[in-house]
Image: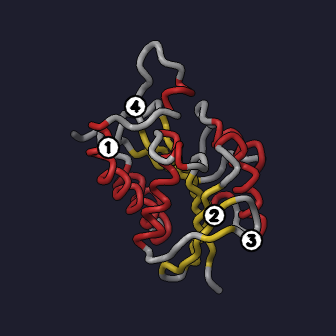
Amino acid sequence: MLQTKLIAGLGNPGAEYEWTRHNLGFLVVSRFVEDAKASFSSSRCCRGLEAQFRLGEVKVVVLMPMTYMNLSGQAVAGALSYYKVEPAESLVVCDDFSLEFGQLRLRSKGSDGGHNGLKSIIENLGTQDFMRLRLGVGNPPSRQDPADYVLSAFSAEERRELDAIISEASDCCRAWVEETDIEKVMSQFNKRKDNE
């Protein structure tokens, strides 16, 4: 029997949010699904879009909650329950303004770090024990509200780098699915900016 893993990319629905920093999770899982030659359709189990495909011996379910960021946990919990996936076999992809722009940080658990999407997931699952791939969007300018910053569009300079960052994060998602040694995946992708 195939093992099932769930990957949830966090963001906000609507064209006005598409290229904002808070939608980096959506952008990454969209690329991941595109690379797998799959496509999204309405989810049968929650308010969201989902795609399914197989990588080796793993059935991959990719979810984009359409609940808006602050209620992401409702969709993620619904999908985990429906597909009978343990939280530890799920990966949440989201932006993080405490990391330098372009930095990837894969972790097996942790607090919400002030991220409302992660906060909602932790509240709905009752655990912090799920994988998360945090994608650095850089610190807000000193006088800008972090909420306004993450809902603002990427700068022209950031847009030039974005494709490579999204591609690398998609590769990380695939490695997480296929590689049994999670420490190996962490050491491969978490080092990106530290060594430059």
Q: Is residue 161 above or below residue 101?
A: below
Residue assigned mark 1: 159
C-beta proximity under 8 Å, tags 4 and 3: no
Q: Is residue 37 left or right of residue 114?
A: left
Q: With respect to residue 189, does 85 lie above or below? A: below
Badge 4 marks a residue whose secondary structure is: loop
* Residue, disc 3: 44
Q: Nearer the viewer, residue 159 or 54?
A: 159
Residue at the image position 60 percent from the left and 41 percent from the top: 110
- Residue depicted at 28% across the width and 45% down the height: 161
Residue type highlighted by circle 4:
Gly
Q: CA distance from mark 4 to mark 3?
A: 36 Å
Q: Is residue 137 left or right of residue 44?
A: left
Q: Amino acid at mark 2?
A: Leu
Q: Nearer the viewer, mark 1 or mark 4?
A: 1
Q: Are marks 2 and 1 in contact (CB under 8 Å)?
A: no
**Which residue was labeled with disc 4?**
138
Q: CA distance from mark 1 to mark 4?
A: 13 Å
Marks 1,3: beta carbons within 8 A: no
Distance of mark 1 from mark 3, alpha carbons?
Answer: 34 Å
Place of residue 9 in the rendered image (x, y in percent of width and height, measured from the top left)? 56, 54
**Of callouts 2 and 1, the N-terminal one:** 2
SS for tag 3? loop
Q: Quadrant of the C terminus?
A: top left
Q: Tell me if residue 108 can be seen.
A: no
For image coordinates 65% across by 86% down, the residue present is: 1
Nearer the observer: mark 4 or 2; the answer is 2
Q: Which amino acid does the dot numbered 3 rest on?
A: Arg
